[in-house]
Amino acid sequence: MLYNIIGEIMKRIDELVELLNKYNYEYYSNDAPTVSDNEYDSLLYELIELEKQNPSLIREDSPTQKVGSKVLSNFEKVKHEIPMFSLGNVFNDSELKDFHNRIKKVIKKPQYVCELKIDGLSVSLEYKEGILFRASTRGDGISGENITHNVKTIKSIPIKLNKCVNITVRGEIFMPKSSLEKLNKEREKEDLPLFQNCRNAAAGSIRQLDSKVCSKRNLDAFLYHLPTNDLKTHYESLEYFKTLGLKVNPNIEICDDIKSVINYIKKWTKKRDALSYDIDGIVVKINSIQDQEKLGYTAKTPKWAIAYKFPALEAETELTDIIFTVGRSGSITPNAVLNPVKIAGSTISRATLHNENFVKEKNLLIGDYIYLRKAGDVIPEVLRPNIQRRTGKELPFKMITSCPICNEPLIKKNNSVDYFCTNDLCPKRNIEALIHFTSRDAMNIEGLGEKILEDFYNEKIITTFSNIYTLYNKKDKLMLLEGFGQKSITKLLKNIEKSKASSLERLIYALGIEGIGVKNAKTLCKKFHTIDDFINATYEDYEEIKTIGKVLASSLVSYFLDENNIKIINELKSLGVNMISNIKLSNKETPVSNKTVVITGTFDISRTNIKNKLEALGANISESVSASTDIVLVGDNPGSKYEKALKLNIEICTKDKLNDLLNL
């Protein structure tokens, strides 16, 4: 067909794009095609020819853009505006009922939505005016990697939605079983290693730098979560996804009681093998958005949802040896060395044995054949020995009495079942402490991974925390190491310099104070705004914080009374490491000092920025509205939180008064 006028060509391209996107949705998302393959191929060929002749007219949402054409040098980091939480796990009906009973303490008659737990990798999709703007991995929940170039090749994920909306949705990318079978046949012909399971294959595919490779892997996706949800129920949000053209798993069920939830789980435990994709459990969520907000979150998981993991898989293998490792606190852990065995698609060659008591209670001998269990991604658990297979040649377990690294005597602390190396100069303890200090949740120094830190320690390049911040003095020595050039060294030093500005709560966690995790560090920094506040605090100061208690209060006091620890802090301070909390920068009174604030709706700046500014001014941010809420900050399109605030007669701060509230 010949087109003489550019306007007619544009019109025809528009018609073809709209038609083909519609047919794609019907085929890949609804599994209900309305045209034959031949008719679809004919229209697609016509579009390809028109675009070849008129490349300037190629639309961003054209289905031809799904073939993959982009090649990256690396993956750009993406910070999630709203964190991507992981789910807590339960493994049996009893644990599921415990979850239900916790819910009932807050929600009298909870209604649940049950969904299949797709065994893939989480993805966040951001649409601007209905066009796919960015796709990113979950990462650590706070930031992930930009995988837009690969996600655009997934046929079931629309580049353009049916409505012109700004929206972020979350879901799961997976590889169907048939795609894995086809892929492994191709790899076998090319004498390449085979993928062990669909999940690994999907993860490997989505991390290809060349999108053409990913486009050939036939990935698929289901969408299941709307992070900013102003609808009344979770089920409504899934129905809304369908109107946008997003693919939702069809096997979703509303359950009015826990008995119905258990029946749903039993049904899909039996039917899971008949599915065309892998599932590793069932996700159970509270349906009411208002009830979700009331239940809230822990530091890493929502309290209103749980993942029921399918019964663990077991395997039998030989326990060939027991070796010992040293943790950053000096704790000594026995570890099983195993004849490698596959469980749930993973090859297992090591497993923790926790402590001396665990080995004795399990009656384990070196040379035993033992049973292992692995559920999902949890660390493999040693269950029991197979007594019937003993030959008499097995050797008894004997706990060591000296550190396997520095040979110093081991001791038990405060009636603990664990043994500890108390040598502050123990190399392994120091290496583990450095690994912790530089980790994501601590000072977050990219480029200083476990292997590099171990090499740097052995080369005496980094042996203390302060050495990290004087690494620029050893650039010449770094240049002599394999894998380090000018570019990588410059990048590493830039990341180290950047970490100096980290807020105090990161440093408090990074120091490795016994018992102090990420959440407690942040809670402490709401009261103690500088490192000197910590140093000068008393046992009573710490204990009066609700989540701290006696044990952690003692741990904190002991840490800050130790002269060696104070020396470490002073060294870091002299090198320019920030010692002030960003949670609250001053003690002056602000409109939100010590007030509980809830944020709902959308704003011109990100909610994360608003939250950070409010916390810096002394506010306590809450996810749900209650009688103890002082202020509800309302943006465009507010949801049930706004309605509840009106009912409770809570102070409302509208978008136009935001600057006043933030004291700008």
Image (cartoon, rainbow, N blue to C red):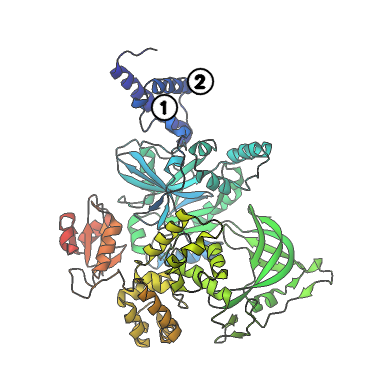
Q: Quadrant of the N terminus?
A: top left
State the mark number for residue 38: 2
Residue identified by numbered label 1: 20
x 36%, y 33%: residue = 60
Q: Nearer the viewer, residue 371 or 474?
A: 474
- Mark 1 to mark 2 CA distance (whole Å): 13 Å
State the mark number for residue 408: none
Task: Tell me where residue 7 sits by quadrant.
Answer: top left
x 41%, y 27%: residue = 20
Q: In the rendered view, would you say 396 is above or below 146?
A: below
Q: Nearer the viewer, residue 239 or 187?
A: 187
x 62%, y 63%: residue = 380
In percent of width and height, residue 275 lies at 57, 43
Q: Quadrant of the C terminus?
A: bottom left
> Could you tell me the amino acid type at mark 1?
Leu
x 42%, y 67%: residue = 443
> Could you tell me the amino acid type at mark 2?
Asn
Q: In the rendered view, would you say 523 is above or below 306?
A: below
Q: Nearer the viewer, residue 289 or 51?
A: 51
In percent of width and height, residue 129 lies at 29, 39
Left or right, 586 with reference to 181: left
Q: Along the polypeptide, which appears first: circle 1 or circle 2?
A: 1
Task: Tell me where residue 85 sits by quadrant.
Answer: bottom left
Mark yes or no: residue 448 visible. Answer: no
Task: Tell me where residue 192 sits by quadrant.
Answer: top right
In percent of width and height, residue 375 lies at 59, 59
